[in-house]
Amino acid sequence: MPKEIILQKGRERSLLRRHPWIFDGAVAAVSGAPLPGDTVEVYSFEGNWLARASYSPVSKLRARVWTFDQAEPIDQEFFNRRIDAAAAYRSRLALQNVTNAWRLVHGEADGLPGCVIDRYGDFVVCQFLCAGSEAAHEMILAALRRDSSIRGIYERSDTDARERDGLKSRCGLLWGEEPPELFAIRENGISFLADLRTGHKTGFYLDQRDNRASLPFCHGADVLNCFCYTGGFGLRAAYEGAKSVTQVDLSAPALELARQNAELNGFYDSLFTYTKADVFEQLRRFRDMGRQFDVVVLDPPKFAETPKQLEKAARGYKDINLLGAKLTRPGGFLVTFSCSGAMTPELFAKIVGDAARDAGRSARIVRTMGQAPDHPVTLDFPEGRYLTGLQLSLS
Ligand code: SAH
């Protein structure tokens, strides 16, 4: 019996617009007893073929579309084509001119739902985040291994997202050589050591590459880099000629790597202050001390995992942006981000605008920011956009 999903009446509309997600509530019937990750044919209530998708019986996101082309089977050739297309796009972006690390596959936006693949030099780090990409992972690996420049493939499927599909976390070498203990990224003239095995995401926030490279106003500035992780924006600020850089993060290992990164780049140690603290508290301490900075960077972790959590998250964003604005000298810059998928750029601009006004400051947009283009967003799938940011000049 063929494995099939039949949608509720009228629920084919999003698929006809090539949106790749099918929620449990849209499904009228399932036949052929598909197992987690199996490929299913998707039909409208009226019986029209719509798509071929991977099935996930436990997730609210019941199926994710592999293809809208009925003539395209989900076989090794399919994965080879998808990986080749993803690589060709990155190659056209000429990323190799500015870095040796980039995202090769960004899930749905590259036609491979639930699959993230980052390239660190000759090493590749993968995340299989849903039942479909999990079931297909051998074919995805085989597709990658056709590239003879790849020396090792490492798995970092250790994100909470897998739990929603009933999958356990899994990490380790999948093929070839182990990556080095710390991989040296070379990005826009700066070196960053990244721990591919235990660092955040696959080791580094590759999505912030272009935003890190856009800080010309740090020259001669006192810079406060909140949620600094391994130093990112602060190291770039030093590269731009900052007078001082204060790096704040809760994580001691991240701060230690930030320190190593500063040394690796030959920056004077005296330029940096490292503060292990909760940013919410540290900003208040600075306020009470009357400290001011020329540039304040706020790049917090995701405050909202789901749209439901957005209201609480909004209070968090408002709080740090209000304090951040207060700590910014007149004529200075506030560089602020949200990586909560549910946060739209419009809502974020409103929250930050309210925060600046409450701080008694007027804010001018210098630059609106998003994720780097190796983390593409398709117009059919706006959910792929998760990073939004603003550079503001405050008077
Ligand atoms: N800007 C960085 C990435 C930041 S990721 C870059 O470009 O590489 C978010 C960081 O916030 C993580 O390093 C995490 O340890 C830290 N963090 C999370 N909650 C925090 C809190 N309440 N106070 C301080 N740091 C926090």
Image (tube, rainbow, N blue to C red):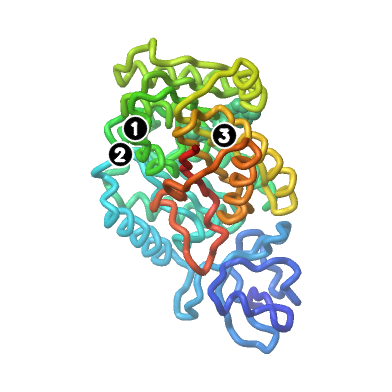
Tell me the element at label 1: strand
Query: Residue at the bottom extreme?
Result: 46
Identify the mark nearer the N-term, 3 or 2. Answer: 2
Residue 221: give x, y in percent of width and height: 39, 25
Q: Do the CB atoms of the residues marked 3 and 2 lie less than 8 Å apart? A: no
Whichever of callouts 1 and 3 sits on the residue coming sooner in the sequence is: 1
Q: Residue at label 1?
A: 185
Q: Residue at x 46, y 35 (%)?
A: 333
Q: What element carries label 3?
A: helix
Q: Are marks 2 and 1 in contact (CB under 8 Å)?
A: yes
Residue designated by label 2: 100
Q: Reply above or below: 102 against 259.
A: below
Task: Report if residue 203 is visible in the image.
Answer: no
Residue at 26%, 44% in the rendered image: 96
Badge nearest the viewer, 1 or 3: 3
Q: Where is residue 80 in the image (x, y as percent from the top left)?
A: 37, 61
Of discs 3 and 2, which sits in the foreground?
3
Q: Which mark is residue 325?
A: 3
Going by the numbered disc 3, the residue's amino acid type is: Ala
The residue at 68%/45% (across/down) is 314
Dividing the picture into quadrants, the one containing residue 318 is top right
Report the image quarter containing ligand 1. Answer: top right
Whether residue 328 is situated above or below residue 72 in the rendered picture:
above
Q: Distance between the residues labelled 2 and 1?
A: 6 Å
